Image (cartoon, rainbow, N blue to C red):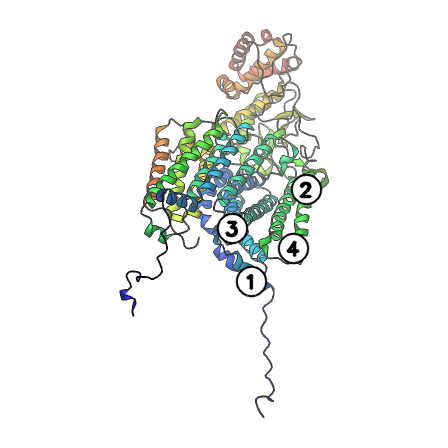
């Protein structure tokens, strides 16, 4: 007897194991995806950053109340949020997940957008009525731009090292803020209503979201 | 003879590698695996844009140039060193290879120390490369002194401590978010340390290596005291040892009982060193070099005065450093400057020359002009002394005009040559004809009492007139705030008019009038009406 003819269980043979009940397959897939990206931990980290923002504004940890000095600590926290979002793109499964996950791009898109929104919510809640320089609009622009930068970095370095993008940008921006560089590429140094700065941040975010949706983070074997 | 009875061939003695060799091999492996070199291009760009550019905007004096290392270069490294150390520390936990590495003959702690050392070595190598560039360029520009090494040593200690803290955080909490969160937390601490150091929130703020920029002549007239640097080194080294000791005590370290005891002892020693440093920092106080005098409200340079820690202080730091001043004669008056500021001598002579020619031969006119250490001049009532004009005073017999180098032209401070020249002229004029009004501690313009207004107005008018005669128009005097006496509006208008009249007189007439009336003017016996 060969295996050629074994297409179906022989009559009277052992019954095939019952398929697991999948009453909510989409929900289960989403929850597994979120767990693989450590989204609950990312949300906790974002909430922590929101608390740090609150503490920084409440206890006046800033270097000054106006100008670039007022931007330093909020920008650091925003960069931290961008780094958390970027690092959450790391997948422990790599190629097998890509090969089988039909809904993967949508899950990546949803997760990135949702985490960015959560970061904005957490930091805005932390900064509420605490006198954040340039207000919620500036926060929105900075968080979106830094998250986009982190997502773009993830496509190059892999998810686990994607924090390099937002934190590297942070260092350049801190210097630019102090030196008064005027380029819109350093959007944190511009007022929130400044269109070129907002456009740059928006473009970086859109590019980051697009790359994350289509390609996701790079699978780096060294990780 | 059978094989049974044949003598066994002696086993060749295996070449046992020395104990140091595997450790070196491990370190070499970790050096090759460390991701730190990948950050070098970005660090190089940051170095070029911030620390190097800032340092080149400072005067070419060693101490102030070296202040860039802890104040600018070190903060650029903080984020990357901590994050990469945390990344390296979390490697085994992240890859779930702890079980594999724990069964190796060497304790896991040794491997972790090698990984930490690799990150630290790369970071320090990059830092030293930046330092070498900065010091090499400064060596071609500086005209006196040599490179200070304490800022380099303290910065390297901070890099080692940061790497140890980041590595331990990564090893204890090996998650994907550990590296960025550790970097953010450490940079926040660094910013807070800087804010407290600049804001003088407490004596403990001296523990932050990142702090304010010292005065232009720090380390020039007196040795810059290393007290705070020694304390910082003790604190940072202690922190590093504590972090590495905690790493050895962790369950995942694979250390045996003896090694754990060693780690515990090391951690305790590190803690003791750090605690001692904190205690010593609490005794730190500011003192003006060479005087032992604490800065006061009347000391305009209190902000930049060095800190001393009595338990670590070497009295030799208070002795003046020997030097031979560089001089040039202007209007028969030798004008001298410290050799460290030799390049500014043309600016000083250009500033003092016109005023010295105007007052030559008059009673109290300086027979010599020389540079004094910042903060060593005690403001007298009536001098025009504000924190954006150079200090100056005329004292001694024969009279010597002493000035400081607080506002030498420096791009990084926004100090232009023009402002330096006019400020120095104002200082000389104010020292020659004191306005007779005490300068408030806040640096706000001095306000004379109602009774003294007429006499003060006459002296203010003379200060304005002498500056105009030296080529500083009234508008420039107002714009730069060179005359720091606030007269009532009407009196000020009269003083301005009198100054313009006096300045319009021929030089010989002005000189002759001053020769006759200078003593009365200084004594407050002349009013505006008596001016020609």
- Of the two numbered discs 2 and 3 on the same chain, state the one appearing first in sequence: 3
Instruction: Please state which of the two labelled residues, at mark 1 or mark 2, is closer to the viewer.
Output: 1
View extreme (bottom): residue = B1
- Of the two numbered discs 1 and 2 on the same chain, state the one appearing first in sequence: 1
Q: Identify the disc placed on residue B90.
A: 3
Q: How far apart are marks 1 and 4 (CA)?
A: 17 Å
Residue B100's place in the image compared with B290, above or below, is below
**Which residue is drawn at the image coordinates 66% and 47% (left, top)?**
B270
Q: Do the residues labelled 4 and 2 touch (CB within 8 Å)?
A: no
Label 2 sits on residue: B275
Give percent across and percent down for residue A90. 41, 47
**Which residue is drawn at the image coordinates 45% and 50% (left, top)?**
B38
Q: Is residue B230 visible?
A: yes
Q: Distance between the residues labelled 3 and 4?
A: 21 Å
View extreme (front): residue = A12
In-image side of B324 versus B496 (left or right): right
- Same-chain status of marks 1 and 4: yes
Label 4 sits on residue: B260
Q: Do the residues labelled 3 and 4 touch (CB within 8 Å)?
A: no
For the residue pair B500 and A206, the one nearer the viewer reads as A206
Residue B17's place in the image compared with A55, above or below, is below
- Of the two numbered discs 1 and 3 on the same chain, state the one appearing first in sequence: 3
Label 1 sits on residue: B104
Quadrant where the image shows the N terminus of chain A: bottom left
Give percent across and percent down for residue B510. 57, 15
Q: Are marks 1 and 3 in contact (CB under 8 Å)?
A: no
Residue A209's place in the image compared with B296, above or below, is below
Q: Mark 2 lies on which chain?
A: B
């Amino acid at each position: 007897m060969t295996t050629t003819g074994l297409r179906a269980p022989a009559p009277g043979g052992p019954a095939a194991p019952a398929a697991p009940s999948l009453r909510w397959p989409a929900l289960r897939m989403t929850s597994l995806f979120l767990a693989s990206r450590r989204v609950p931990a990312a949300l906790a980290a974002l909430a922590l950053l929101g608390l740090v923002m609150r503490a920084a504004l409440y206890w006046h940890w800033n270097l000054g109340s106006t100008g670039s000095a007022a931007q330093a600590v909020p920008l650091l926290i925003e960069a931290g949020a961008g780094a958390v979002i970027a690092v959450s793109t790391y997948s422990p499964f790599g190629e097998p997940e890509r090969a089988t996950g039909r809904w993967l791009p949508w899950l990546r898109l949803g997760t990135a957008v949702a985490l960015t929104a959560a970061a904005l919510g957490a930091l805005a809640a932390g900064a509420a009525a605490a006198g954040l320089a340039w207000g919620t609009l500036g926060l929105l622009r900075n968080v979106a731009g830094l998250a986009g930068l982190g997502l773009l970095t993830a496509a190059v370095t892999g998810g686990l090292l994607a924090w390099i993008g937002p934190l590297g940008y942070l260092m350049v921006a801190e210097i630019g803020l102090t030196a008064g560089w005027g380029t819109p590429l350093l959007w944190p140094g511009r007022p929130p209503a400044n269109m070129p700065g907002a456009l740059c941040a928006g473009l970086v975010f859109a590019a980051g979201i697009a790359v994350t949706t289509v390609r996701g983070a790079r699978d780096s074997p060294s990780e | 003879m059978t094989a049974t009875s044949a003598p066994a061939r002696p086993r060749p003695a295996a070449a046992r590698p020395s104990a140091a060799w595997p450790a070196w091999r491990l370190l070499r492996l970790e050096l090759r695996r460390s991701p730190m070199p990948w950050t070098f291009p970005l660090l190089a760009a940051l170095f070029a844009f911030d620390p190097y550019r800032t340092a080149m905007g400072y005067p070419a004096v060693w101490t102030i140039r070296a202040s860039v290392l802890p104040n600018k270069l070190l903060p650029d490294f903080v984020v990357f060193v901590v994050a990469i150390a945390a990344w390296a520390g979390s490697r085994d936990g992240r890859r779930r290879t702890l079980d594999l590495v724990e069964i190796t003959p060497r304790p896991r702690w040794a491997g972790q120390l090698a990984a930490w050392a690799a990150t630290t070595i790369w970071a320090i190598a990059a830092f030293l490369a930046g330092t070498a560039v900065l010091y090499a360029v400064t060596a071609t520009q500086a005209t006196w002194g040599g490179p200070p090494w304490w800022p380099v040593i303290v910065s390297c200690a901070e890099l080692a401590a940061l790497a140890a803290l980041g590595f331990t955080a990564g090893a204890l909490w090996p998650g994907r978010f550990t590296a960025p969160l550790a970097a953010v937390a450490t940079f926040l601490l660094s910013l807070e340390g800087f804010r407290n150091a600049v804001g003088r929130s407490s004596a403990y703020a001296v523990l932050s290596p990142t702090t304010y920029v010292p005065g232009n002549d720090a380390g020039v007239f007196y040795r810059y005291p290393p007290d705070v640097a020694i304390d910082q080194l003790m604190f940072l080294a202690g922190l590093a040892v504590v972090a590495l000791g905690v790493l050895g005590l962790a369950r995942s370290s694979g250390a045996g009982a003896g090694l754990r005891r060693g780690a515990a002892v090391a951690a305790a020693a590190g803690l003791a060193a750090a605690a001692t440093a904190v205690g010593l920092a609490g005794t730190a106080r500011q003192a003006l070099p060479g005087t032992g005098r604490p800065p006061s409200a009347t000391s305009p340079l209190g902000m930049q005065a060095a800190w001393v820690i009595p338990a670590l202080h070497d009295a030799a730091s208070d002795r003046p450093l020997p030097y031979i001043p560089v001089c040039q004669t202007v209007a028969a008056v030798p004008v001298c400057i410290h050799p460290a500021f030799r390049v500014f001598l043309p600016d000083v002579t250009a500033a003092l020359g016109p005023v010295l020619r105007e007052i030559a031969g008059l009673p109290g006119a300086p027979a010599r002009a020389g540079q004094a250490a910042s903060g060593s001049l005690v403001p007298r009532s009536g001098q025009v002394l504000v924190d954006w004009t150079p200090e100056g005073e005329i004292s001694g017999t024969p009279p010597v005009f002493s000035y400081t180098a607080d506002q030498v032209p420096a791009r990084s401070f926004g100090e232009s040559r023009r402002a330096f020249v006019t400020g120095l002229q104002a200082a000389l004029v104010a020292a020659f004809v004191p306005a007779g009004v005490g300068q408030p501690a806040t640096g706000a313009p001095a306000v004379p009492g109602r009774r003294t207004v007429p006499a003060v107005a006459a002296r203010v008018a003379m200060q304005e007139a002498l500056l105009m005669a030296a080529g500083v128009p009234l508008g420039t005097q107002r714009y730069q705030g060179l005359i720091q006496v606030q007269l009532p509006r009407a009196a000020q208008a009269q003083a301005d008019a009198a100054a313009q009249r006096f300045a319009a007189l021929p030089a010989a007439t002005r000189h002759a009038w001053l020769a006759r009336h200078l003593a009365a003017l200084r004594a407050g016996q002349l009013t505006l009406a008596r001016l020609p």
